[in-house]
Amino acid sequence: MKGGAIMKYSLFTTKEIKPLGYIKDQLRIQAEGLSGNLDKMWRDIRDSAWIGGEAEGWERVPYWLDGFIPMAYLLEDEDLIARGQKYIEAIIANQKENGWICPCTDEQIPAYDTWAVQLISKTLYTYYLSTGDERIPEVLYKVLKNYYELLKKGTVKLFFWGEHRWFETFIALNFVYDTYKEEWLKDLAKILKTQGYEPLNFAKLYKTPVSKTIQQTHIVNLAMMLKYEAVSYEILGEEYKNNAEYLYKMLYNYNGTPVELFTGDEHLAGLSPIQGTELCAVVEQMFSYELLYAYTGDVKWLERLEVIAFNALPGTFSDDMWTHQYDQQSNQINCIRFPAKPIFGTNNFDSHLFGLEPNYGCCTANLSQGWPKFITSAFMYKDDEIINAIQIPTKLTCKKANIELNTEYPFKQQFNYKVEAKEDFKLIVRIPSFVEKLYVNGEEIIKQNKLIFDFKAGESREINISYKFEPEFINRPYCLKSVKYGSLVFSLPIEAEWKMLEYERNGVERKFPYCDYELIGKSDWNYGFSDVELSVEEREVTKVPFSSKEPPIVIKAKMKKIPWGYEPFYDTVCAKVPKSTEAYSDEELKELYPYGSAKLRMTEMPMVD
Ligand SMILES: [Zn+2]
């Protein structure tokens, strides 16, 4: 990634990193599902005002392209590449001479929420990283210059989304500054920060979440916000104070879930395992952590990133990625429409259904960025170092080296690196903190947080690394426990009947395969753990890596039934906490599935008496 001047580690492009193995299968599923087909069947992409149509012309096309384009290039799929390019060409062609790029009239500009300007600048930068298209630096220069002039004159002001997502502009702003080094860009940075909101002033609100529509506790704003200081401090001439860690802890301590999300349905909702989290927040939190690591080099963001990517992201999609939820819950025993007031704070009655656009269509467009950006973060670099940040099967082809990493991590703990050095460099492999035993080429070595391998130009070598660690119970609020094994969180799966719903609402058709589904729970879910012993069983990773039918790994746990009960006034939602932890059944050996495979699940459960 250009923009390296202020990054601790720079990102490689989609030309340099390619997915292999199971992660390629996962990306192919995405391409063959909703994400890869929205331009054919969903009005807000197919007929968007961004390409001269009548439909939504604000955030949905930029959200979609931000993931669709890197996906197309990672898969080297000519058809996907051509379809993305059509949108980019229309967007560039519609840019006005003065730089304004969003599809609206001049008269509309003074009242325009410029979140769309911030977002399209980020998307065009993502496109540039995939293609190196030489027109983009100037396109972005003009977008930002025009934005600067409008803000400086007072023609536009930051309000609503733009005011609470101001830092998103800095992804492109840092790049344009690195390219042109013009002083007005620093002035633009200051105006954005001054007109934008200051997260630190509102962190106390995280302690007492209320179901109210306020921007400062909006879950997607918060997921994006965590990177605000990292991306902005240098161009603003400020000192880095690591505010992200304080804000993360405030969010996590009062709203954290076992899969590293914060409840937000769609505003912060506390620690209850039956509150939901919006999918936009899942992918935005991932992107924030990828950049937090790149900008600061602090590995804890990568550990948190893995937990979201390997659990929360797959957990909220159907196996074929044609349907997704708006809100996912950690204890989710049914996904059935609420006949009256939903359990969710400010989200509606169908937010937890698997569908085309349950609740609202933002996630339908924005879901595309999750896997592609995660894959592109597998390796990063700095001077003579190449860092393997995320250990997923990938192939890196760059100036210094060719590196192929074959692994089925996080399902299995073996890693095979084939390295061909073209220049002298150091390969740095990050070792997660939960690793208990560490082996290199078959020999156990002392546990450490990174391994450094020196390579000389022309040298070819294979390295085999493996880990050992044990599954563990982690404490959750309300005296509940979750099972974790490395970065994977495990849930008691509940058999689901998928009830197809085909219908039309507000002119948007739901039809197979882009229909909605209610998931009706068909097996008992009222269990607690009756023994601390857990045993891991590795299985085959199939073509559907997070399959709900053939999970790649299970954990066996001894469990007993307890009287749990339903949440008052809801007969499809389990109670926040069980009525009692006194077991009333014999012990059973139950299989726990990875959270990402268990579409209906219990993730937070007590120890029985
Ligand atoms: Zn959304």
Image: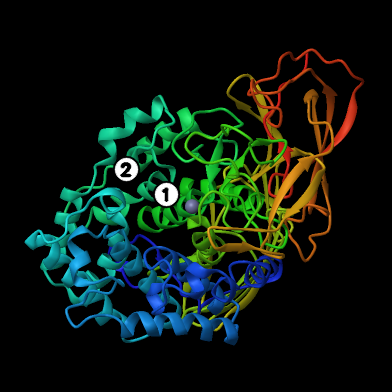
Q: How is the image coloured?
A: rainbow
Please tell me in which quadrant of the rendered image residue 151 appears. bottom left
Please say if 400 is above or below 554: below
Answer left or right for 344 relative to 486: left
Q: Position of residue 201 (x, y in %)?
A: 25, 34
Which residue is nearer to you in this view: 476 or 346?
A: 346
Answer left or right for 480 relative to 425: right
Where is the C terminus found, in terms of image quarters? top right
Answer left or right for 530 relative to 248: right
Residue under the image location 26 percent in, 47 percent down: 240
The mark nearer the N terminus, 2 or 1, is: 2
**Amino acid carrying mark 2 in the image:** Asn
Q: Quickly name the residue at label 1.
A: 298
Answer yes or no: do the residues labelled 2 and 1 have beta carbons within 8 Å?
Answer: yes
Residue under the image location 38 percent in, 74 percent down: 50
Q: Position of residue 456 (x, y in %)?
A: 51, 77
Q: Position of residue 568 (x, y in %)?
A: 64, 20
Residue under the image location 61 percent in, 31 percent down: 274
Residue 242: image tag: 2
The number of numbered badges drawn on the structure is 2
Please tell me in which quadrant of the rendered image residue 394 appears. bottom right
Please say if 425 is above or below 328: below
Residue 549: image tag: none
Residue under the image location 77 percent in, 41 percent down: 520
Which residue is nearer to you in this view: 596 or 461?
A: 596
Answer left or right for 592 relative to 81: right
Ligand 1 neighbours mark 2 (CB distance < 8 Å): no
Where is the N terminus found, in terms of image quarters? bottom left
Q: CA distance from mark 2 to mark 1?
A: 10 Å
